[in-house]
Image (cartoon, rainbow, N blue to C red):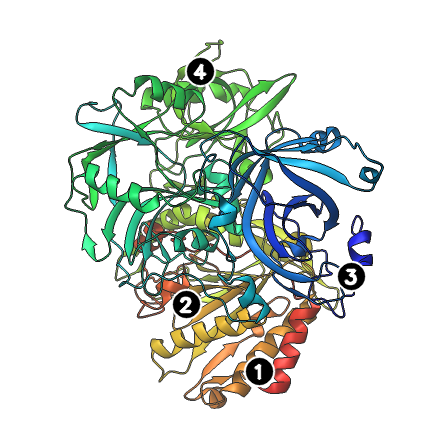
Amino acid sequence: MAGLGIYLDKRDFGATPEPSDDGTPSRLGLRYSMQNHDATRLHWDLRLEWGGVLLSWAVTRGPSLDPADKRLAVRTEDHPLSYLTFEGLIPKGHYGAGTVLLWDLGWWQPLEPAARGLSKGHLKFRLHGQRMTGDWNLIRMKGRKASDAKRENWLLVKIDDEAAHQRDPVARHRTSVASGRTFAAIRADKPAALPVHPGALPRHQPVQLATLTDDLADAGAHWHELKLDGYRAQVALGQGGPRILTRGGHDWTDRFAELLPALRDLPCKAALLDGEIVAGGGLQGFGTLQDAIKAGGPFRYVAFDLLHLDGRDLTALPLTKRRKALEKLLRPLPPMGAVTLSPIIHGQADEAFAMICGMGGEGVIAKRVDAPYRGGRSRDWLKIKCRRRGEFLIVGWQASDRRGRPFASLAVADRQGEALAYLGKVGTGFDAEAMADLARRMAPLVRGTAPLKVPRREAAGVTWIAPELRIEVDYAETTAQGRLRHAVFLGLRADPPSEPCPPVQARKDRPITAGIAISSANRVIFDKPRLTKAGLADYYAAAAPLMLPELADRPLSLLRLPEGMAGERFFQKHPGKGFPDALRIQAIADSAGETSPHAYATDAAGIVGAVQMGTVEFHIWGARRDRLDRPDRLVFDLDPDEGLGFAATRRAALDLRDRLDGLGLASWAMLSGGKGIHIVVPLRRQAGWDTVRLFSRGVALLAAQSEPKRFTAEMSKARRKGRIFIDWLRNERGATAIAPFSVRARPGAPVACPVSWDELARIRKASAFSTEAALERAWADVVPPDPQGLTARVIKALEHALTRGS
């Protein structure tokens, strides 16, 4: 462990509970903690993540929020990242003997280049902790004594900002942010004593929504607040809380667990707050928030309304009174912290709105100050968005699946120096005349390759042209990935001469969907509800963006019903002649070394091309074609005996989730659209098929051994009677499982749909969602966990559980 030699040399890890492992660097942002250390001399240890270690300073009198105070901070040895949350008793006779209390925890943000600041001896940074917030200076002192050469003395000084001049944190906070324990409780090894809200936990309330408008509201009747780019969330405080609920009422507490300590500090018996969760730790943008959800933080909750307080319903009160109660509730929390108030713009908002837009903000929300809180959309709240304009080059177009539209969107770019930078697609703002004119001008500019670098997934299905046409575009913002968001076509800026090119007309009896001509379009595939071949193609074209993250570049098995539900059906793994070119082919060798063609899709055209050949169901391999020897998903198909109801399968899914969680593996669930439920574990592409197959079999055997009356790991119908077969055989090379959002060839055309674990408890059958419902809900609140490894620790945990039989 480079940089940790001094730390390791000073400790006997056979006797001290302090960690010896390196720990894991943060995936997003930089972690910070402060530990109160009751050693020979009471002090506070400041830890800042940097360069794979925790830079450490011992602050002798603790931090001060008075900018006039200069607190001595003695630089100590670097600590491992695993020390960040350490709390415990270091035995007498060992280095640092005494009690360590986790006094603060959060994130830090360099305000100037950190490497330069550390080198020059002046580090300027911002803390995003549960107790310590705002801007700070660490300043290295010049040594004046001979003994100073053996240590680095720094000064920790608060910068004068909103978080300064608050109550003395050293006197105010004497317990752990992680466990709520005092020094004495930690020494006595007592259990955690976190603060609780004793009142009844309020239920989710239908959220109030804003109506989009172009103009700022009347300042006499409204105030304006910042429009935030995050997730709408209600926070329920009370017995069993805090709970964090999405706009639709789903419980996402586990995903935003980092916010819970700050929410527990709110002084009330019970409450229901309304607000928005955004990226924290000084990070910005919705894309960053998505990354933060995967990484477990950082987050910030911006509260803008209070609906219930201590058993009293406040929704009938005017906004001004609800806001006053909210401000009082949040007053004890540190300014600039993880839970903050939404700032208000009083009076005329023109200048503030221009500043917000100029700084890349989302816009503002205008709210009637005398209005009650009403669920649903109304004009009591108005949404005014910032818009931007720019001129960009057309580099290609995406084909449309709608008759009469020459393209669905334009691929655009901008020159950055000598190179072109891809900015994404513009898909709205065109009228029929503009589309026809653009199609005519683009036709003679077609080229075989892209004129710039474009990610493969974004390039799929694009017809490229020479970058000679420039258009004006209105857009909301540029994302962190450099893509235009909510882009709208305004007009063509240049008119280079080009010869008219007559558009290619599709045959009237063959509608074009995703660039594929659909024959026998009116053939009925499903009777009830009536779904024709063209309708099925339309569904899959619309569902393609939902399917492709899991389906793209995987070998497919296709269930074909060329004559619909009334005709014959058969699986096809090896496509023959007649399949559209959009459905790609790859030769794959079997165990004997003989190769055969396998189909795969990369875009909507590939999926719809399979539908044109009579496909209804799509089944996917557990590996992608670039690494067929390394599966990236583990699937358990819970297949109940005929006599069992869905409730038994639902309970089994939740139990299997818990078993996997106990082994260290997170999972997500999908209704099969038939009778069962699929449990999916995303995998890192490390283990081979044999390891994955044996592991999945072990999990199934573990459940069957533990509860033989409920589960079986054997496929035999006789063994399955009255039980649920945990089908682990889908984890063999060449085996397949139904793809998310695939229609099932069953009465009613049900769809295989991902569901959240919270939602699963309310679902009554595995075929709960129609094609229409599947498109409307999309992935809903389901965020598949990050890929995980079948590590030695995970496998050992399974072996141990099998030995114990539980």
- From the image, tell me which residue sits under label 4: 500
Q: Distance between the residues labelled 1 and 3?
A: 43 Å
Question: What amino acid type is highlighted by mark number 3?
Answer: Arg
Q: Which residue is pictured at 49% across the width and 45% down the height?
A: 169
Q: Which of marks 1 and 4 is in front?
A: 1
Q: Does residue 785 lie above or below 746 as drawn?
A: above
Question: What SS does tag 2 mark?
Answer: loop
- From the image, tell me which residue sits under label 3: 11
Q: Distance between the residues labelled 3 and 4?
A: 80 Å
- From the image, tell me which residue sits under label 1: 701
Q: Does residue 449 lie above or below 250 as drawn?
A: above
Question: What SS does tag 1 mark?
Answer: helix
Q: Distance between the residues labelled 2 and 3?
A: 73 Å
Q: Mark 1 or mark 3: name the one nearer the start of the chain.
A: 3
Q: Is residue 664 visible?
A: no
Q: Distance between the residues labelled 2 and 4?
A: 48 Å
- From the image, tell me which residue sits under label 2: 568
Q: Mark 1 or mark 4: name the one nearer the start of the chain.
A: 4
Q: Which of marks 3 and 4 is in front?
A: 3
Q: Where is residue 644 in the image (x, y as percent from the top left)?
A: 36, 82
